[in-house]
Amino acid sequence: MEDNQNSKRILIVGGGFVGLTLAAKLLKNLNSYVIVLEKNTKKIEEFLIHEYGVYEPGLNSIFKDARECNRLHFVQTLGELPVDIVFICINTSKNELNRHDSLISVIEGLFYNIVRNGYIFLRSTVPVGTTTIVKNYLVKSDRSDLRISFAPERTVEGIALKELDSLPQLVGSTDYDSLEIGTRILESFKFSIIQTSNSEVAEFIKLMSNIWRDSTFAIANEFALFAESLNLNIFEILEKANFDYPRAGIPYPGPVGGPCLSKDTYLFLESFKGETNNDSIIYKARKQNEKITTIAFQKIIKFIDVNLAKKKILIIGGAFKGKPRTNDIRSGFTQELVKMLRGHQLQVAIWDPTLLPRDLLVDADCYTTSLDFETYDVVVIGNNANFILEEPVVNFLLNLPNATLIIDMWGATKNLDIKAKIYRYGVGI
């Protein structure tokens, strides 16, 4: 493949958030021809009717223009279609068995389609050393001509297209020539590039960046529990600790989840084969953050055990975060809490103006458009979205009866004078 060719035939493997936002970025280059390979039949059907399942400002417009120009296609199989560049954007999960074998199998299935001297970019988050393992396999296979780099996705959901235009793109390879060619390819799509000395450094950086954020949130969450145990208000503490003091910058406490932070600590520790890492600070930090959902669940169960007739629960905010706005619920506070509540045969409804029923996946039947203060016994603040402090939701919360329990793990209601019984994480009841 000539890396300076005018027309680029690009394959993106995986039609999730990472793959679709990358496709939109690449399509800004008018010489790009993008194919998204997605195995999920339902997703393909939705793509074909212009429903992409990703809340990302600007994405629909880019896709509309590209499809009208025949530069974007969604397929389940490639057939004999040749491609020059491949981006692997498949989802990775923690504690996945045979991870490397599965990845190699995906790449091997593309051998027929990738042109000679084609290029593969791994964009999925992987344990350190994965790119080298794949490269060693390629060298021993009949496609030793293929080059590969690790170029991770580093964006925030909700502003991904903006960040793909502004954030530097990490690139790490197993050899100098692959690094230089990969850099030129990405620069042709207007990425700014940071080269690393090898692929392991890039893999380490990707995981470390997310683990650092996860761990700082864990410290704030532990401070919240300490403050609550002393009948102190963690929000007053943090506001005054951070005010005009540059060496604080301590984040507010609250749930920490989503498809990245919930798993990247485990992927990182997976890089150290045969070693026990349960004593590591980052492992304990991740476990600290995983406690948040359990704390909320226990508060609800304790309340219901005392009030046996109360079984109807409303969660306001279904996405794993509220800022920036997103429709992704994966590994978030709401998704995990619903799983626990349903295990106790409780009636759960989810209200979120950003979401459609399909966004809730297996919990689509929980979707509601109703905010009726007389209907629910427990109301849970599911994320920190701006709509929680907009008039309809504020009025709903202010009108809840005294007998209702509100669970606020985010501090979203800290400035509201609510008459209902309320538990605020880091403050208490």
Image (spheres, helix red, strand yellow):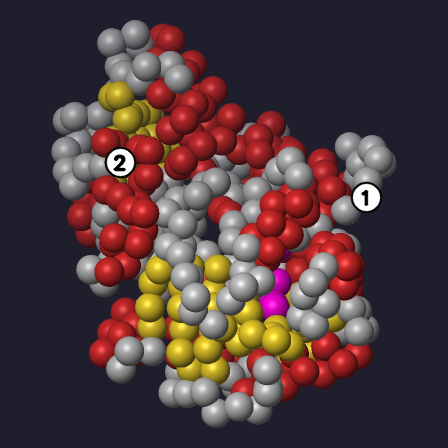
Which is nearer the eye, 428 or 317?
317
Res 130 visible: yes
Question: Residue 297 lies in magenta, yes or no?
Answer: no
Res 420 visible: no
Residue neighbourhood size for the residue with mark 2, other residues' Cα within 10 Å, grouped as few (<14), some (14–19), many (≥20): some
- In the image, residue 207 lies at what x, y percent? 68, 55
**Residue range highlighted in magenta:** 120-125
Tag 1: residue type?
Phe
Q: Earlier in the sequence, mark 2 or mark 1?
A: 1
- In the image, residue 308 lies at what x, y percent? 30, 7
Q: CA distance from mark 2 to mark 1?
A: 38 Å
Which is nearer the eye, 328 or 37?
37
* Disc number placed over residue 272 in the picture, else none: 1
Residue neighbourhood size for the residue with mark 1, other residues' Cα within 10 Å, grouped as few (<14), some (14–19), many (≥20): few
Q: Residue at x 69, y 63 (%)?
A: 142
129, above or below 66, in the image: above
Q: Residue at x 64, y 52 (%)?
A: 104
240, above or below 71, in the image: above
87, above or below 354, in the image: below
Q: Is residue 428 left or right of residue 146?
A: left
User: Which element carries disc 1, helix, strand or loop?
Assistant: loop
Tag 2: residue type?
Ala
Tally the numbered discs.
2
Q: Residue at x 61, y 75 (%)?
A: 116
* Disc number placed over residue 375 in the picture, else none: none
44, above or below 224, in the image: below
* Disc number placed over residue 364 in the picture, else none: 2
